[in-house]
Amino acid sequence: MSSHESEDRTIIPATSRATTMNGKKGGKSKRNKPLTLKSMPQKRRKSLNDVIYESICERTIIAQKRSCIEMAQAKIKFTKDLLELGINSTDEVKAMVTEHFSDK
C-alpha cells in the first residue's frame, strides 16, 4: 500500500468549519438570504389622472404668469402711446374709444 492510499481524508465544506483560513471564527453565512434595505414607507402611486391634472395645473400657472407679464407690458406700451399722442386723462381715452365704435 502506498502512503497516498492509506490516508483517509474527509473534506469538510467551508460553511461548516469552525474557523476560517485566518483563524477567526466564521459567522453563519447569509448568502442564501436576499439582501434587504432599510424599510421605507410605501409611497402611494399616482394615478394617470393625477399626473395629467398636475401637469395641466403647472402649465396653466406658467401661462398665467406669462400672460400677466405680457398684460403689464401691453399696458405700459399703451400708456406710453397715449402720452406720445398727448392724451393724459382717462376721459379722453373713453371719448376716443366711444367715438371709434359709434362710427361702425
Image (cartoon, rainbow, N blue to C red):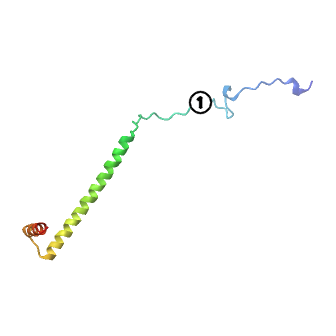
Front-lying residue, 20 or 63: 63
> Could you tell me residue 23's position as x and y percent?
67, 32
Q: Secondary structure at mark 1?
A: loop
Front-lying residue, 30 or 23: 30
> Could you tell me residue 28's position as x and y percent?
61, 27
Q: Which quarter of the rendering shows the C terminus? A: bottom left
Residue in view at x 14 percent, y 74 percent: 83
Q: How many marks?
A: 1
Tell me if I can see residue 83 in this picture.
yes
Is 75 situated left or right of 45 in this image? left
The relative height of residue 95 versus residue 64 in the rendered view (above or below) is below
Circle 1 is placed at which residue position?
A: 30
> Could you tell me residue 54's position as x and y percent?
34, 46
Q: Which quarter of the rendering shows the N terminus? A: top right
Badge 1 amino acid:
Lys
Residue in view at x 26 percent, y 59 percent: 67
**Residue that protrudes farthest toward the left in the picture:** 91
Is 85 situated left or right of 39 in this image? left
> Could you tell me residue 32's position as x and y percent?
60, 29
When asked about the image quadrant of residue 22, the answer is top right
Is 12 situated left or right of 27 in this image? right
When asked about the image quadrant of residue 100, the answer is bottom left
Residue in view at x 36 percent, y 45 percent: 52
The relative height of residue 26 versus residue 46 in the rendered view (above or below) is above
Front-lying residue, 44 or 103: 103
When asked about the image quadrant of residue 81, the answer is bottom left
